[in-house]
Amino acid sequence: YEFKWNDKAKQPKEFLEAYPNTEFKTINKENYLDFVN
């Protein structure tokens, strides 16, 4: 997970190389309640 205030984020290259079969999700002010519930 990556936490950002705005909803614009991209996957870091190093993350993709280290974890090629992993889902990347960004948590922001619009969807954080779904994450914490």
Image (cartoon, rainbow, N blue to C red):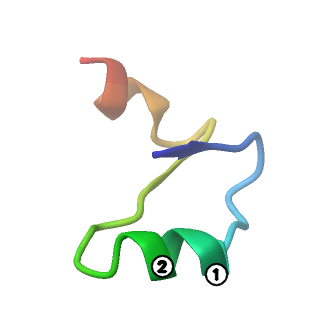
- Left or right: 16 with respect to 11? left
- Left or right: 35 with respect to 30? left
Please, what is the three-letter code of the amino acid marked with disc 1? Lys
- Left or right: 4 with respect to 32? right
Disc number for residue 16: 2
Picture residue at 69% right of the left edge, 67% below the top? 9
| 10 vs 27: above or below | below
How many C-alpha atoms fall within 10 Å of the one at disc 1: few (<14), some, or many (≥20)?
few
| 13 vs 28: above or below | below
x and y percentages locating residue 35 in the rendered image: 33, 30
x and y percentages locating residue 23 in the rendered image: 29, 67
Picture residue at 24% right of the left edge, 18% below the top? 37
Q: Is residue 10 visible?
A: yes
Picture residue at 48% right of the left edge, 81% below the top? 17
x and y percentages locating residue 16 in the rendered image: 48, 79
Instruction: State which quadrant residue 33 falls in.
Output: top left
Please report contact status of discs 1 and 2: CB closer than 8 Å, yes or no.
Answer: yes
